[in-house]
Image (spheres, rainbow, N blue to C red):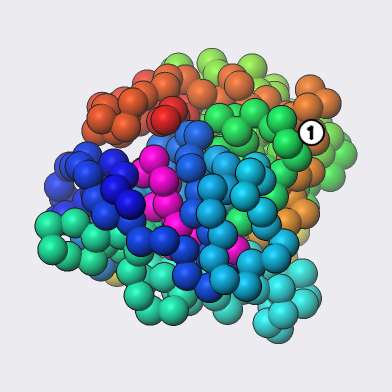
């Protein structure tokens, strides 16, 4: 079949929206008609090269829609099912999955390769095969994905909102609740309050944090962070240090989550300074692939038992956490509508990313 999709053809290029050919689903795959797709910063990393991915590629990894066709052997998903696409597939039976670590499933090795799990491509254009960002390619009206990347949700779910539960919400929320293990009464600092960081703020609030300090140089984002549960805001890590020190009587925060646009090696030292004894620094943002040096006081790490932890997908388990987050939304505890600053047509995707780069959006959304 033919569908319209946003394709990145070259490093540093623009997303080009064009008609592409989409093959039917193979064994263990489903064809999904997308309702919406989030404009996540990770797709910008394809443009800059911070996520090295073979080009050309159909972008997008944050989406939801309806199943319109199923491939051979698919028995647990049916035509008409409402689904959220999760950018991390889980097989359910590898060593990591059976230990409840589905976010690091062995299938993740295929995420940045380009083709589907069987090594072949579903999208084609200009005589070339097109990869799919994280096996998904949600910058397309239709896409074919493995069932390992699909979470079935209740009929009647607002799929335009549920699209954001495919990546940004669980990544941010989980960074606080799962990776940082925030508990009632904790003090939490979030560095960067875009589409990921603002959900870390929400996660800390829902977990019962006493103080949640949102740090961002953009005034608009600081203002919005207060709506999502931040108790205080600061424009820099240095300003946050003075604030946290005063609020905690010098004990500092239990957790600091780095959710900036890009993780720089120089960010770890100020993040470590913001946490106290046994404090946890969570690195959620994507760093430059060639950067291998971070700044930190090894003496402080030893003497105060401070920790640095990586967070992939917020250490979430999609099959459990996606429905649970939607339940929190339905109960009025998790804000999703308010995350969407602007909606765009697929044809306006480059404007959406320009708005993201300029700090105008918490989250942009493509509605099909």
Task: Please state the horizontal and vertical placement of residue 250, each as a whole percent of the image.
Answer: 72, 39
Q: Which residues are magenta?
A: 134-149
Up/down of 247 relative to 124, above or below? above
Task: Please state the horizontal and vertical placement of residue 30, each as a whole percent of the image.
Answer: 53, 59
Q: Residues within 10 Å of mark 1 (few under 14, many from 20)?
A: few
- Callout 1: SS: helix
Residue 207 visible in the displayed image: yes
Q: Residue 230 occupies which quadrant of the picture?
A: top right
Up/down of 38 relative to 355, above or below? below
Query: Between residues 5 and 62, which one lies in front from this camera angle?
Result: 5
Q: Is residue 129 magenta?
A: no
Q: Residue at x 64, y 17 (%)?
A: 227
Q: Residue at x 67, y 57 (%)?
A: 77
- Disc 1 target residue: 328
Up/down of 352 relative to 116, above or below? above
Task: Spot the residue most to the right.
Answer: 184
Q: Is residue 146 magenta?
A: yes
Q: Residue 114 occupies which quadrant of the picture?
A: bottom left
Query: Between residues 76 and 323, which one lies in front from this camera angle?
Result: 76
Q: Residue at x 62, y 50 (%)?
A: 79
């Amino acid at each position: 079949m033919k569908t319209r999709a946003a394709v990145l053809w070259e490093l540093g290029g623009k997303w080009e929206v064009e008609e592409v050919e989409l093959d039917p689903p193979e064994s263990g795959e489903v064809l999904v008609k997308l309702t919406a797709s989030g404009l996540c910063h990770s797709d910008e990393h394809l443009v800059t090269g911070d996520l090295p991915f073979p080009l050309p590629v159909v972008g997008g990894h944050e989406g939801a829609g309806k199943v319109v066709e199923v491939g051979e052997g698919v028995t647990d998903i049916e035509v008409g099912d409402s689904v959220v696409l999760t950018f991390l597939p889980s097989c359910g039976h590898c060593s990591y999955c059976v230990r409840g670590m589905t976010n690091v499933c062995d299938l993740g090795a295929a995420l940045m390769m380009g083709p589907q799990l069987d090594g072949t491509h579903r999208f084609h254009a200009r005589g070339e095969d097109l990869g799919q960002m994280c096996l998904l390619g949600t910058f397309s009206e239709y896409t074919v994905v493995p069932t390992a990347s699909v979470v079935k949700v209740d009929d009647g779910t607002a799929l335009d909102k549920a699209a954001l539960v495919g990546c940004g919400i669980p990544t941010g929320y989980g960074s606080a609740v799962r990776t940082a293990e925030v508990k009632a009464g904790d003090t939490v600092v979030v560095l960067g309050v875009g589409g990921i960081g603002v959900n870390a703020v929400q996660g800390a609030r829902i977990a019962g944090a006493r103080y949640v300090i949102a740090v961002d140089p953009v005034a608009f984002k600081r203002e919005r962070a207060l709506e999502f549960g931040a108790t205080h805001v600061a424009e820099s890590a240095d300003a946050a240090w003075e604030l946290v020190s005063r609020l905690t009587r010098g004990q500092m925060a239990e957790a600091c989550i780095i959710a900036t646009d890009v993780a720089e090696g120089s960010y770890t030292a100020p993040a470590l300074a913001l946490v106290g004894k046994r404090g946890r620094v969570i690195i959620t943002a994507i760093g430059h692939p060639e950067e291998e040096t971070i700044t930190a006081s090894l003496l402080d790490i030893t003497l105060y038992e401070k920790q640095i932890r990586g967070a992939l997908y917020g250490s979430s388990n999609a099959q459990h956490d996606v429905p649970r987050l939607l339940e929190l939304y339905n109960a009025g505890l998790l804000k999703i509508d308010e995350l969407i600053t602007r909606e765009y047509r697929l044809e306006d995707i480059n404007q959406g990313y320009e708005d993201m780069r300029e700090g105008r959006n918490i989250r942009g959304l493509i509605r099909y």
